[in-house]
Amino acid sequence: MLRNIRQLNILLITVLLIFTLFGGGCLGNKAPEPINLEPGDPRLYELGPIPDHVTNLTTFFLFANTTIKAVTTITNTSTLDIAIPVDMSRSTAKKEPDIGDIVVIGSTSPFAHHSNPSTFSNISFNSTYTSSQGKNTIHLHFAQTITGLVAYSYALEQGQFYHFPSRNETVIVVLPEGYDAGNFILGPLRPKPDSRSIDIDGRVRLRWDDTSPIQNYINVKYYKSSLPTIMGILVIILVAAGLVTAIYFKSQIRKLRQMRESMESDVKK
C-alpha cells in the first residue's frame, strides 16, 4: 500500500514538473507584448478598388523576392488581429515580428464606405503581439470604431506563402507578374481557391471566399510560369537519352553475343 502511494506521489510530481516547464512557458508566450510599428506611405500599396459586396477582405501582393504586401479592409470595428507566419529562412534572433510600413486610414463615420478611400484619414492605434504555433499575431486597437484600410509589409521564404485566417473574410492572393501556382507536381493549392483570374497587369489572382479561423491555413507555392514547360522539356530529354542509351547497350550486347557464338563455332570445327 505504501509503495503504491509513493509511486502515485512520484507520478504527480512528474506531471507537475512537466506542466511547469512546458505548459507554463506556452502560457507565457500568449501574454501580449507591446510592439512599435513603423509607419508607411499609402503610395506603397494598391489600396483599391475593393470588390463589391465584400465586407472583410485581405489582399496579399506577392513579389519575386521575399516581400509580401497586404491590404486589409476593416468595417465598423475597433480592433484587428494580423497573423504573420514565422519566416523559417531568416534568423530567429529577432524577437519581435518582422512587419513594417504599416498604414492605417479610415473614417469614424457610420456611413463610410471602402469605395471612396480618398475621404479616409490617418488613424492612430495601439499595438501588441503574441507568438504561438509558428506565427506572430499583431493586435491593433483603435480609439473608436472605424471603417477603413490597414496595409502592411513583411517577408516570407521565396516561393512560399502561408496565411492563417484570424477572422471571417475573403482572401485574394496576387502572384508576381510572370509567376503561376497550382501545379500538382510543384505544389497544389491548399485549399483549392474559389476562383482564379488574370488582372490587367497580367498577374494571376487567386480568391478564397468566406475563410475563417476554423480553417488551418492557406498555402500557395508559386513559381515562374515557364518552369513547368522547362521541366517537361527536361523530362523528354531524359527519357530520350534513356531510350538511346538502352538501344545502344542492347545493340552492343547483341554484337557480343554474335561474336561469342562465332568463336564457339570456330572451336567446334
Image: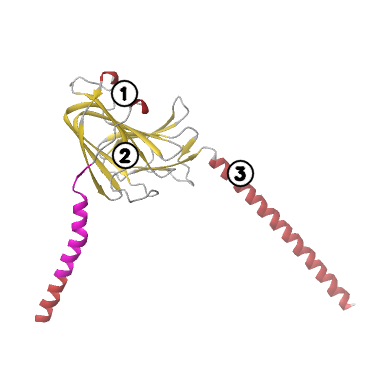
Across and down, in percent, residue 215 comes to 29, 44
User: Mark 3 or mark 2, which has the lower sequence index?
Assistant: 2
Across and down, in percent, residue 265 comes to 86, 74
Q: Which residue is mark 2?
A: 99
Q: Which residue is mark 1?
A: 52
User: Mark 1 or mark 3, which has the lower sequence index?
Assistant: 1
Residue drawn where x is 17% and y is 62% of the image = 20
Residue drawn where x is 54% and y is 41% of the image = 227
Q: Is residue 231 above or below residue 79?
A: below
Q: Could you say whether the residue bearing mark 2 is in a helix, strand or loop?
A: strand
Q: Amino acid at mark 1?
A: Asp
Residue drawn where x is 14% and y is 69% of the image = 13
Q: Quote the CA–CA distance across marks 1 and 3.
A: 43 Å
Q: Which residues are magenta?
A: 12-34
Q: Amino acid at mark 2?
A: Ile
Q: Quadrant of residue 123?
A: top left
Residue drawn where x is 79% and y is 64% of the image = 255
Q: Amino acid at mark 3?
A: Ile
Q: Quote the CA–CA distance across marks 3 and 2.
A: 40 Å
Q: Which residue is mark 3?
A: 233
